[in-house]
Amino acid sequence: MNEQNRQAERWISFTLRIGVLTSALLLGTGLVVEFLRPHAANEVTDPLEILRAVLSREETPPGMILLSAGLLILMFTPVVRVMTALGTFMLEKDRAFSFVAIIVLVMFILELLISLA
């Protein structure tokens, strides 16, 4: 394995580690905050409703914001990993793996669009 391949593997590994560690930190902190907070009986627990509340800047419990952010980062970590791999494949001028990475990226995007429909 040449130095360029090792560098690409390091970037891909770094991307995965940062995504998973950031997600774990946010999820753990969100769980602790939610555990310590008194709850109302009629609170919304649907993730899409929580995300809508966060994006519309409604008052959302801080623990739920942290949990939502942790889940979003965890869900998008594979997408960022594929984008990182695509970038390294394109720099290496590896057309076959670049094509495969583009197909996987398109599949991620289509899956996201279908799930939101």
Image (tube, rainbow, N blue to C red):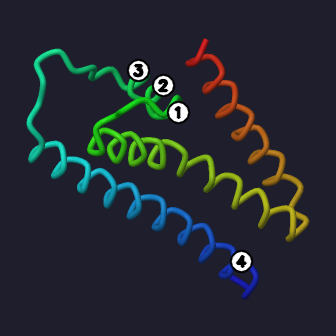
Task: Name the residue tied to disc 1.
Answer: 55
In this view, 68 is above or below 9: above
Q: CA distance from mark 4 to mark 1?
A: 40 Å
Instruction: Give the farthest residue toward the bottom.
Output: 3
Contact between labelled residues 1 and 4, with CB atoms less than 8 Å apart: no
In this view, 17 is above or below 38: below
Q: Residue at x 26, y 49 (%)?
A: 30
Residue 21 at x, y percent in the picture = 38, 64
Q: Residue at x 11, y 30 (%)?
A: 39
Specify whether 99 is left or right of 47: right
Q: Assess disc 4: are there few (<14), some (14-19) or many (≥20) residues with their C-alpha within 10 Å of its C-alpha.
A: few
Q: CA distance from mark 2 to mark 1?
A: 5 Å
Query: Upstream in the sequence, badge 3 or badge 4?
Result: 4
Type of the residue with mark 3:
Glu
Q: Secondary structure at mark 4?
A: helix
Contact between labelled residues 2 and 3, with CB atoms less than 8 Å apart: yes
Residue 100 at x, y percent in the picture = 76, 45
Q: CA distance from mark 3 to mark 1?
A: 10 Å
> Residue 31 has which mark?
none
Q: Assess disc 3: are there few (<14), some (14-19) or many (≥20) residues with their C-alpha within 10 Å of its C-alpha.
A: few
Q: Nearer the viewer, mark 3 or mark 4?
A: 3
Task: Name the residue tied to disc 4.
Answer: 5
Residue 84 at x, y percent in the picture = 69, 61
